[in-house]
Amino acid sequence: MRLIDWLDERLEIRKLIKVTLIDYKVPKNINFLWSFGMLLVLMFAILFISGLFLLMYYKPDSNLAFDSVNKTIMMDVSFGWLFRHVHAVGASIVFLLLYIHIARGIFYGSYKPPREVVWITGYILFVLFSATAFTGYLLPWGQMSYWAAQTITTLFEKIPFIGPDLVIWIRGDYAVADATLTRFFALHVVFLPVLIMIVMAIHLYSVRVVGSNNEDGKPIDKKKEGVPFWPVFMSKEFFVMTVFLLFFFFLVFYKFDFAMDRVNFEPANPLQTPTHIYPEWYFLAYYEVLRGFFFSQNLGLIAFALSMVLILFLPWLDKSPIVSGKNRPLFQIAFWIFILDFLVLTVLGKLPPTGLYAWIGLIASLIFFGFFISLPIIAKIEKKQLEGEKK
Amino acid sequence: MKELKIFLIIVGLVLVGYYGIEPFAHHEMYGGLPKPDFNYLDLKYDIDIKGNPQNGENLFKQNCQSCHSLKTKNLKAMMDENTAMQAFNVVPPDLSNIAAIVEKHFLFNFIKNPQNATKNPKFAMPPMSQLSDQQIVDIIAFLEKTAKKEITGEKILEDACTRCHSVKYQKIKAFTHPENLKKYLGKVPPDLSLKGRSKTKEYLEAFINNPQAVLPGTSMPRLGLKKESTEKVITYLQEISDPHKEERNKIGLWVLGYMLIGVFLTYAWKKKVWQKIK
């Protein structure tokens, strides 16, 4: 008790805890899907710590990187393999958490006023996590690392005017090479994590200001309804966390192949293209949108770029006054089609883009955009219905 | 109940997605491997005569020892390794255990016509057309006598692979100098340290059994390994490419057990806290 008094005098620690955790009232009618935000904080911490230990042995040099990962870390350092497994599986699973977190936001309308800033900062976090995953994937310098980086950086070539120069600027060379590895390394271990922490702080702050959304989408009376974030909400959160960690460590120890592709255990070879190049699963859907418009590369690229940014504009595409999808039957149909479509795109992204798969890919890509087009229409219909009821 | 429903929907979607991007996609991409044929039935000559190992020993000295050693019998090759490497661009193998590693019918056809048996027109050993069928069978009988009955995957790797392949994480360098290998095969063969991890068991089996059928144009010769030797060498490759597997499986159980206790404890606390609510 002494220590906390001492701290309280100097830092007003009690007040800080009261304001941030105890006075922070969370609605009672939220299900476990609202736990994914804190799960993501947890996952980021796990990635940060496991990454730190990997950093102690990793060598960012195209001649040393592969062996430093696959020999030193995986074979020689005590529990080096554990840290790599945790980091690799964590980097993959963090996207599963992100997607569930985002889907929850979409379904219950968590992007609607007054939560636009929560949505925007969340979107920025998604982009930052994607960039971190992409730069980090190059570091083991395996075949898939190399060719995925080569393929994705080539996409920038098509940007009008600055494209070709931009690609060389990103790579630091005419092809992916040592210079690319070192700059991706710098971005992955310093720049991007620092940015993530800053934006995460803003994201959490903005949630604290406007409060959590809930299943019904109706704002709560914070004095009467709501339960304190600490300890009531967190007691449930800890339960969700342990269940999640049970699943996570099962993957880490027994089912890690999905996050550590076999092909990447071959050292990078610029002279030999692998038979199949594919991104990690969390980028497959966008990759499929890129390939979906198989008859025109430029159209594919535009669609690819759009597919990644459209979601940012949800608050302005969907202006329906009804917040939660729970009370919006039309929206629910669109939502579930969108979710299934995203799943189909993800699977197709890994399959060879030939024959029937190419056509399904095109249709699935169109449905993907269909969701965003349907939103303003559904909003309009709902507005009319509401007006009709009032009369 | 409602939360359980949501949970089950998520589990369902994740499982379908997992099936799609892992087993299904991998089958679509890498499936269709040719079935390995460990009897090498495409080779035409069949042996139906019995061999005489004594004759075989003499024939070995006359016909094989100029290039090949036989360490178990203290027979040294007349040509030392360096000279052989300069002449053929590859070090000829020691034949002590060859009969334990290679299938008999293949070995017979191989001695008759190495280029045909290995499906590699550049294979360094010349056809032994001076030998009669009986003489070849005698040599094989002799080699069978010298070969160890029980042979480990590590030894098979050494006898069958490391003339051309390095295994640098095991500190094994290819016996032949990389420059010579480049001249012989057109490129330096890949290191085998992580092949047990970068390739599936099925792929390695099909590839070692018949390289040309899996990767047309590859410079890897068919070596005629028995089913048993193929399996042993693959198991060994898997062990060296994933040396912590046992440790991982063991620690995993402890970690999962720990987490499971955590699930019960956190659930109990949650119950306690939420009792007062509502």
Image (cartoon, rainbow, N blue to C red):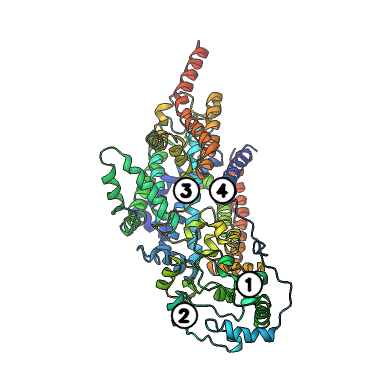
- Residue A19 in the image, given as x and y percentages of width and height: 41, 44
Q: Which mark is residue A240?
A: 4
In the rendered image, residue A315, in percent from the top left (x then y), is placed at 41, 30
Output the chain of dot 1.
B
State the residue lying farthest toward the top. A391
Going 45% across and 54% down the picture, which residue do you hit?
A144
Rendered location of residue A337, percent (x, y): 55, 31
Number of the front mark, 4 or 2: 2
User: Which residue position is annotated with label 3?
Assistant: A278
Element under label 3? loop
Name the mark nearer the viewer: 3 or 4: 3
Residue at the far bottom: name it.
B74
**The residue under label 1 is which amino acid type?**
Leu
- Which is more N-terminal, label 1 or label 2? 2
- Identify residue for label 1: B107
Q: CA distance from mark 3 to mark 2?
A: 44 Å
Residue at 47% from the left image edge and 30% from the top image edge: A366
Real-space Cα distance between discs 3 and 1?
42 Å
